[in-house]
Amino acid sequence: MKKETDKKVKTKKETEETEPVFRFFLSDGREVQTLEGLVVPVTEKTEAAYRLLSEME
C-alpha cells in the first residue's frame, strides 16, 4: 500500500510547457540548429528523399 507521501512531486521544469529543441549533426562534424538554407547534395543516399519531396509540391 502506497502512502500519500510516496507520490512523486513534479518539479517546475517537469510541469512547464517547453518547445522541443532540435540539433542536427552534419557529416562534416558541424552542429546546426536548423536545416533552413542548407543545400544537401544529391547522392545515392539522398536521391530517394529528393524524389519524395519533389512529388509533394
Image (cartoon, rainbow, N blue to C red):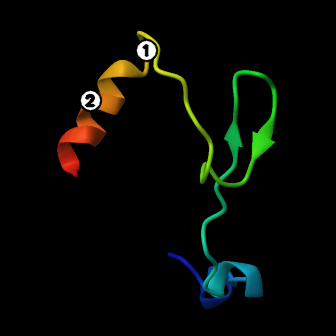
Q: Residues within 10 Å of mark 2 (few under 14, many from 20)?
A: few
Where disc 2 sits, the SS reads: helix
User: Is 37 in front, or is 11?
Assistant: 37
User: Is 48 in front, or is 9?
Assistant: 48
Q: Which residue is mark 2?
A: 51
User: Toward which corner of the image does residue 26 lie, by quadrant?
Assistant: top right
User: Is 52 in front, or is 20?
Assistant: 52
- Location of residue 23 in the rendering, given as x and y in whole percent from the top left corner: 69, 49
Location of residue 1 with respect to 4 vertically, above or below: above
Query: What residue is drawn where x is 77% and y is 22%?
Result: 28
Q: Is residue 21 left or right of residue 52?
A: right
Q: Which residue is mark 1?
A: 45
Q: Is residue 52 left or right of residue 11?
A: left
Query: What residue is drawn where x is 26% and y is 40%?
Result: 54
Mark nearer the N terminus (2 vs 1): 1
Q: Residues within 10 Å of mark 1 (few under 14, many from 20)?
A: few
Where disc 1 sits, the SS reads: loop
Query: What residue is drawn where x is 79% and y is 40%?
Result: 31
Label 1 amino acid? Lys
Mark linked to residue 6: none
Foreground: disc 2 or disc 1: 2
- Location of residue 47 in the rendering, given as x and y in whole percent from the top left corner: 36, 20
- Location of residue 33 in the rendering, given as x and y in whole percent from the top left corner: 72, 54
User: Is 4 in front, or is 23?
Assistant: 23
Could you tell me how many numbered marks the image carries?
A: 2
Query: Residue farthest to the top?
Result: 44
Label 2 amino acid? Arg
User: Toward which corner of the image does residue 10 lie, by quadrant?
Assistant: bottom right
Location of residue 13 with respect to 40 vertically, above or below: below
Asked whether disc 2 touches disc 1, contact meaning CB atoms under 8 Å apart, the reply is: no
